[in-house]
Image (tube, helix red, strand yellow):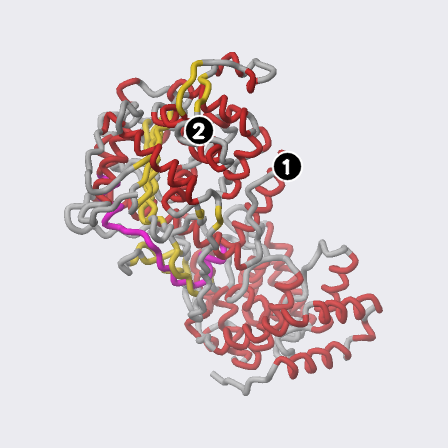
């Protein structure tokens, strides 16, 4: 492996401009002006990006370009939770000397005819790309990627179709050419090409599609396979083996133009019938390693722990990569169109970042406590064990979800997305703790109505509220003027009186209350939710135990909110730290959270809605709020001690009514979980 002396950004810029000037005669003036303006505009950013490219490529090695790259996830005790890679990925690595010459020539002919002589990028192609970008007013940025650039995109960058990513591509390609030989770059590229169906490298493609080694492929078969990486899904041989034939013929024609083969060779290859072997002959699904089971943990609980932890880590890590790519998260929307447009942007950015997470190598450390998760999973399973009805796919119909947050750090330490179950693999399916949005019922009152009301300074625990008729109020023209029996705010909270919360929301205004909700990053609040029904937890899309736990943690943190995550460190393959702790946001005043905490302690006593579970721990205080939705379709309890905040949801997958004998489950799960979490902790009071 040869490594040449590094050159600085200034040298690179001069070399690049000199190469560009050689192509001026082929370009129109607008492209030249556009390029100069872009360079001037992005100069500070370009310099930083170039320094990153120098550092990253210099820190790379041949192992960096292995197709088997996987991100590793660790729990709080540095035990491996998961390897984030495509479980169905198949590859066989070939050294440069073992790659058939026709493979190399085919890729060069169709992708990068100046590969052996260029500097890793093609100046003429770059200008053509800029011209398309300018003429389309920034909508089109494509093409002009040499083999070296494509390798850099696969290994170091994401798949964003942006001008800045294209410029980074060029910088990385420049450094690659200065660091590795052309033979090494070609070796890395051929082995990293995806040939559809999770197949990487020409050797594995030859085996799976034709049942032979790459060295035994005919010219026609070789050109056929080299057509696939351009658009793997479109040219997928197991979906439609005829689609790649046209591109095969183009490759053969290009090889003739480059002098790699004769016209007679091309004609013979085009005439050859391509027969792709059946998928069953090539592909044995050996994905999914056995979960490691230790101690007395049952296999199904260990599997559930692994899957629920992993699915949440993937969400957190993917969103970290979205942040690094410049995506702006939004929690307030002025219209349904704005909400829908944002969700489309989010989905696209999420997919790009998710693909990077699974195709590049990251080291991810988390706050997740696997031992605690195992115990809480077992407790949830045991509490719900009497409900054995099964629905679609044989999954238990009645479910639960739970999120546990460490109040000191704001990190998620356990997240349970449902019941564990023999014969049911939860991986890749629903993690209800953050993916199942359900109506929060009365657990929404403290954060939307009562705390905001106290925040105004006009209300406190002893303020008189009116318990109005909610049914009549929904038809009334002026709810503020309605009358009802008088009660103290404290009593209304601890006994979950709907009429009082509805009346108070009308007094402070739902728009005012929603300002606090938006600060706490509830992701599915839409314009239709700006009604008094939200005061009782009636939302269009609902919320999750993750969102509720993170919101209630604010009561333990002086009124400051921090968006939830389990990530404590996330490093790329070069050891660069990517994770940054989110800033805390002030939501409520200290005096407000002190009053609300004092009020919600009463939920466990004095006839409060959670008094039935008998929280009798004299050493560690607890506070919280129950939640029940219309027709008892969802049952919640979200509560906290000085140490932890836990939110629990129970209900049916199909959102049907819960029978009277099942309404206590969420409270029992919460008590068991909190008792376990605080075991051995020093006495602590609010």
Which residue lies under the disc numbered 2? 439
Q: CA distance from mark 2 to mark 1?
A: 21 Å
| Magenta segment boundaries in residue numbering | 355-378
Is 583 on the left or on the right of 131, as rendered? left
Q: Is residue 190 above or below residue 387?
A: below
Q: Is residue 307 above or below residue 447?
A: below
Residue at the spot 52% in from the left edge and 34% down from the top edge: 513
Residue 408, position in %: x, y?
34, 52
Extreme left residue here?
Answer: 296
- The numbered mark, 2 or 1, whose residue comes first in the sequence reads 1
Q: Which mark is residue 334?
A: 1
Residue at the spot 40% in from the left edge and 28% down from the top edge: 462
- Secondary element under disc 1, as helix, strand or loop, is loop
- Secondary element under disc 2, as helix, strand or loop, is loop
User: How dense is the environment of label 1, judged by Cα within 10 Å: few (below 14), some, or many (20 and up)?
Assistant: few
* Magenta stretch encompasses residue 359: yes
Residue 634, position in %: x, y?
38, 26
């Amino acid at each position: 492996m040869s490594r040449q002396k590094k050159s600085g950004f200034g040298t690179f810029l001069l070399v690049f401009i000199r190469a560009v000037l050689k192509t001026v005669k082929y370009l129109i003036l607008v492209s030249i002006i556009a390029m100069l303006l872009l360079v001037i505009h992005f100069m500070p950013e370009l310099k930083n990006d170039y320094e990153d490219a120098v550092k990253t490529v210099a820190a790379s090695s041949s192992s960096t370009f292995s197709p088997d790259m996987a991100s590793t996830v660790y729990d709080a005790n540095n035990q491996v939770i998961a390897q984030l890679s495509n479980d169905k990925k198949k590859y066989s690595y070939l050294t440069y000397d073992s790659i058939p010459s026709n493979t190399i020539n085919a890729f060069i002919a169709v992708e990068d005819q100046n590969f052996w002589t260029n500097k890793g990028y093609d100046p003429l192609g770059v200008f053509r790309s800029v011209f398309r970008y300018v003429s389309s007013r920034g909508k089109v940025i494509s093409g002009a990627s040499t083999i070296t650039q494509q390798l850099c995109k696969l290994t170091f960058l994401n798949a964003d179709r942006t001008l800045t990513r294209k410029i980074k591509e060029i910088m990385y390609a420049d450094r690659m050419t200065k660091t590795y030989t052309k033979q090494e770059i070609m070796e890395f590229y051929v082995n990293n090409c995806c040939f559809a169906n999770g197949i990487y490298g020409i050797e594995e493609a030859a085996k799976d599609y034709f049942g032979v080694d790459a060295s035994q492929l005919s010219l026609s078969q070789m050109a056929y396979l080299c057509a696939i990486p351009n658009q793997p899904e479109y040219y997928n041989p197991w979906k439609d083996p005829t689609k790649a034939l046209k591109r095969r013929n183009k490759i053969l024609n290009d090889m003739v133009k480059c002098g790699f083969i004769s016209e007679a060779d091309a004609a013979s290859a085009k005439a050859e019938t391509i027969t792709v072997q059946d998928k069953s002959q090539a592909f044995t699904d050996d994905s999914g390693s056995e979960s490691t089971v230790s101690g007395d943990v049952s296999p199904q609980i260990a599997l559930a722990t692994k899957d629920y932890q992993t699915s949440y880590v993937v969400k957190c890590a993917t969103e970290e990569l979205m942040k690094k790519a410049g995506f702006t998260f939004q929690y307030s929307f002025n219209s349904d169109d704005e909400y829908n447009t944002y969700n489309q942007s989010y989905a696209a950015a999420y997919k790009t970042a998710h693909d990077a997470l699974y195709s590049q190598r990251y080291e991810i450390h988390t706050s997740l406590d696997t031992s605690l998760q195992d115990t809480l999973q077992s407790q949830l399973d045991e509490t719900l064990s009497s409900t054995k009805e099964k629905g679609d796919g044989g999954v238990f119909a009645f479910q639960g979800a739970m999120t546990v947050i460490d109040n000191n750090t704001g990190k998620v330490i356990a997240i349970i997305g449902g019941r564990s179950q023999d014969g049911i693999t939860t991986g890749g399916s629903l993690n209800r703790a953050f993916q199942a949005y359900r109506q929060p019922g009365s657990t929404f009152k403290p954060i939307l109505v009562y705390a905001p009301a106290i925040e105004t300074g006009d209300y406190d625990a002893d303020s008189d509220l009116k318990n109005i008729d909610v049914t009549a109020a929904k038809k009334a023209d002026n709810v503020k003027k309605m009358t009802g029996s008088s009660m103290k705010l404290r009593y209304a909270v601890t006994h979950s009186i709907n009429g009082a919360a509805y009346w108070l929301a009308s007094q402070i205004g739902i728009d005012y209350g929603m300002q606090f909700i938006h600060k706490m990053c509830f992701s599915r609040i839409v314009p239709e939710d700006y009604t008094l029904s939200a005061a009782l937890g009636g939302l269009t899309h609902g919320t999750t135990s993750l969102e509720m736990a993170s919101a209630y943690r604010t009561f333990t943190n002086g009124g400051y909110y921090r968006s939830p995550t389990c990530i404590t460190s996330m490093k790329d393959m070069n050891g660069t730290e990517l994770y940054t702790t989110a800033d805390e946001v002030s939501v409520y005043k200290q005096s407000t959270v002190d009053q609300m905490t004092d009020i919600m302690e009463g939920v466990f006593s004095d006839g409060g809605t959670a008094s039935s579970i008998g929280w009798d721990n004299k050493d560690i205080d607890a506070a919280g709020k129950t939640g029940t939705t219309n027709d008892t379709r969802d049952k919640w309890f979200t509560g906290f001690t000085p140490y932890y905040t836990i939110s629990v949801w129970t209900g049916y997958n199909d959102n049907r009514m819960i029978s009277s004998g099942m309404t206590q489950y969420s409270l029992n799960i919460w008590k068991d979980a909190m008792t376990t979490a605080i075991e051995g902790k020093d006495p602590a009071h609010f």
